[in-house]
Image (cartoon, rainbow, N blue to C red):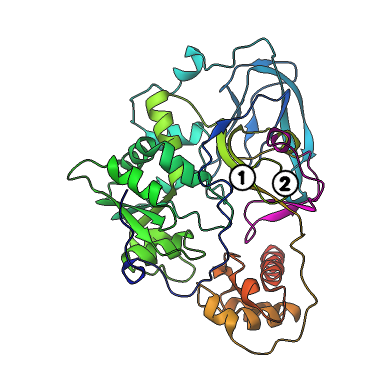
């Protein structure tokens, strides 16, 4: 196993916070496959961009991996059946975070083997990496890091721009979550294969895989499979949140700052998640679209914490049952990690492509009594984007949208570092979200 570097030698970014890791329950848990459920609910909008359009009808039989909804624009992606069965309905259903939307409901055929047929894999011929952008879009691959940004968009280099470096995010800096960790440990060759496919597509010179130092087995597994003279390098990073944010990752590894309001392409960079890279490798080498992903189910309120390979559309309640169910002491279920995740009020919602974790808590992560701001400046020291969260919050409360623009509210990616360190328990990240809503309404009105 690779020896850890001294703290001073590890790459990192400025500011950030150090929440307790809480990864011990699942960091060594081998990925297990979940049993098939009877019914799957596939949201047409589970990625950034335009919702996909159904291409099946109620009562139609579908095969596992069959296209059931197609993209309707460039920033849109496809959707595939996670199991062989019958389309039972196309109707609005509850979705995570209190939302609802149009979904395709597939009822599993209990007598089918649930294997990918030749007819499905022939749509994506193994070994053929030509036209990777279109293939990734029609395979439904999105970013696995949480935002679910369509991956093919990041593979498309705008005219007049170039990508010098590709960055794979293997940080997994959110407490509790270990799904990316296990993918790197158990499937390092797929991660590296996907990294090389991405590098070739964007014509980059190098690939940097950023992995935090609390994952020495993942670092060792990746480095053991990198051939000599490869343009791929694994970079050991300091354990700090939010190290996995793309702008923080680029800054930590090569010390290039993405300008305010700009994307990584402005500093000749492209960022993908390690599990996304593995999915791209599976598409090219195995001919399979995205129909499942690894999800960490953990927390003190779950009977059996685990890393589970889950078909997209699986009811959340069935995933929890697979892990032994909620304990009587469970008081809250959070989708995602404790820093950026959202509490869930309904367990009858589906697993989506962007879901990395399900966290069962015995003590709800509710806010304590809010106190007056004491002007301590801790939120300024914590913010990785060098914003002034306290002043932004004040402008939000007074609905001063011009000041919100001037103070670069749009650069906030809601990492919650400011809320984490605030001794006055100010709901800073929630106010940032409210402020963005004000700016959206102002833009719509204009």
Do the residues under discs 2 and 1 have CB atoms within 8 angstroms?
yes
Query: Which stretch did the figure color magenta?
Result: 319-348
Q: Position of residue 231 (x, y in %)?
A: 23, 48
Report the residue marked by disc 2. 96
- Image vertical order of residue 271 relative to residue 150, above or below: below
Q: Residue at x 36, y 49 (%)?
A: 219
Image-based side of 113 in relation to 127, left or right: right
Report the residue marked by disc 1. 355
Q: Position of residue 82 (x, y in %)?
A: 61, 26
Residue at the extreme bottom of the image, as rendered: 375
Image-based side of 84 in relation to 272, left or right: right
Label 1: state its secondary structure. loop
Does the magenta-highlighted stretch encompass residue 336?
A: yes
Q: Is residue 78 visible?
A: no
Does the magenta-highlighted stretch encompass residue 45?
A: no
Q: Residue at x 22, y 40 (%)?
A: 227
Q: Residues within 10 Å of mark 2 (few under 14, many from 20)?
A: many
Label 2: state its secondary structure. helix
Q: What is the quadrant of the C terminus in the image?
A: bottom right
């Amino acid at each position: 196993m690779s020896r850890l570097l001294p703290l001073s030698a590890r790459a990192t970014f400025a500011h950030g916070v150090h929440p307790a890791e809480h990864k011990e329950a699942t960091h060594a848990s081998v990925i297990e496959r979940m049993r098939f459920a009877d019914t799957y609910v596939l949201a047409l909008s589970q990625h950034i961009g335009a919702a996909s359009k159904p291409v099946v009808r109620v009562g139609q039989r579908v095969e596992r991996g069959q296209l059931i909804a197609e993209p309707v624009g460039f920033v849109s992606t496809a959707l595939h059946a996670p199991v062989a069965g019958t389309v039972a309905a196309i109707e609005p259903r509850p979705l995570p975070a209190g939302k609802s939307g149009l979904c395709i409901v597939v009822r599993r055929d209990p007598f089918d083997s649930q294997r990918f047929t030749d007819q499905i894999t022939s749509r994506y011929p193994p070994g053929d990496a030509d036209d990777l952008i279109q293939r990734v879009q029609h395979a439904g691959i999105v970013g696995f890091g949480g935002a679910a940004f369509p991956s093919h968009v990041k593979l498309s280099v705008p005219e007049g721009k170039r990508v010098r470096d590709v960055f794979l995010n293997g940080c997994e800096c959110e407490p509790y979550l270990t799904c990316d960790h296990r993918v790197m440990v158990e499937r390092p060759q797929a991660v590296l294969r996907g990294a090389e496919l991405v590098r070739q597509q964007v014509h980059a010179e190098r690939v940097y895989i950023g992995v935090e130092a609390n994952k020495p087995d993942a670092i060792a597994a990746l480095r053991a499979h990198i051939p000599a003279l490869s343009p791929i390098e694994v970079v050991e990073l300091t354990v700090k949140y939010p190290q996995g944010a793309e702008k923080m990752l680029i800054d930590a590894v090569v010390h290039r700052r993405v300008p305010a309001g700009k994307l990584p392409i402005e500093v000749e960079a492209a960022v993908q998640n390690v599990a996304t890279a593995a999915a791209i490798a599976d598409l090219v080498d195995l001919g399979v679209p995205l129909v499942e992903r690894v999800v960490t189910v953990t927390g003190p309120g779950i009977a059996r914490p685990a890393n589970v390979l889950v078909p997209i559309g699986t009811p959340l309640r069935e995933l929890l049952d697979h892990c032994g169910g909620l304990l009587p002491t469970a008081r809250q279920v959070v989708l995602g990690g404790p820093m950026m995740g959202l509490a869930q009020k309904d367990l009858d919602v589906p697993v989506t492509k962007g879901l990395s974790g399900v966290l069962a808590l015995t003590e709800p992560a509710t806010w304590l009594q809010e106190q007056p701001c004491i002007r301590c400046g801790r939120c300024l020291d914590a913010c990785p984007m060098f914003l002034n969260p306290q002043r932004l919050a004040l402008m939000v409360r007074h609905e001063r949208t011009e000041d919100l623009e001037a103070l670069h509210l749009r650069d906030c990616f809601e990492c919650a570092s400011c809320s984490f360190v605030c001794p006055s328990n100010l709901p800073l990240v929630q106010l940032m979200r409210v402020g963005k809503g004000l700016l959206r309404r102002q833009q719509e009105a204009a």
